[in-house]
Image: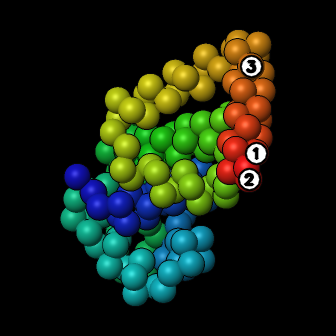
Amino acid sequence: MLSPSLEDYLEEIYRLSLIKSEIRVRDIAEKLKVSSPSVVKALRKLHNESYILYKRYEGIYLTQEGEKLGKLLVKRNSVLQEFLSVINSQCDVEAEAEAMEHYLSSPTILSIEKLVAFMKKDREILNKFLKFCGTEEKKHWSEELE
């Protein structure tokens, strides 16, 4: 099992692999806003765990297992961002999803994915929920002011 930090590296490597044929340390460092030595340390760990193929001064490539897990990590993040959008959360959706993703179990993520699909399929329910949230929020704040 990977640490949240290593999951972030693998997730970014997977994203980069979708747009680049060869990934370099600097590509990851720029995307994650970390130093090159930090990237190299993470790459060695991911290589030792057989998620990537990495040799110093060469490109970084996902193994079959790394691609499978990377795809899952990207999907998990996407599901959480979509969930936050559907519930109309007034937050930095990207940062919030990033904070949530490492601490929710797979069954919880799957349930959230089903809820999002349900809400998007039944716009009437979604609109009722959003209306409820707006009404309840106003009610809550008006009670606080009394």
Q: Is residue 49 visible?
A: yes
Q: Are marks 3 and 2 in contact (CB under 8 Å)?
A: no
Q: Which residue is mark 3?
A: 128
Q: State how far apart marks 3 and 2 are (Cα).
A: 26 Å
Q: How is the image coloured?
A: rainbow
Please state the total of marks drawn on the protein image. Answer: 3
Residue 32 place in picture, x, y as percent: 54, 72
Residue 48 place in picture, x, y as percent: 21, 65
Classify mark 2: helix, strand or loop.
helix
Dot 3 surroundings within 10 Å: few (below 14), some, or many (20 or more)? few
Q: Are marks 1 and 2 in contact (CB under 8 Å)?
A: yes
Residue at the outermost front position = 146
Residue 67 place in picture, x, y as percent: 41, 46
Quarter assignment of residue 57: bottom left
Amino acid type, residue under disc 2 in the picture: Leu
Amino acid type, residue under disc 3 in the picture: Lys
Q: State how far apart marks 3 and 1 are (Cα).
A: 21 Å
At a point 62% along the width and 42% down the height, the residue shown is: 84
Tag shown at residue 142: 1
Q: Which residue is mark 2?
A: 145
At a point 35% along the width and 35% down the height, the residue shown is: 106
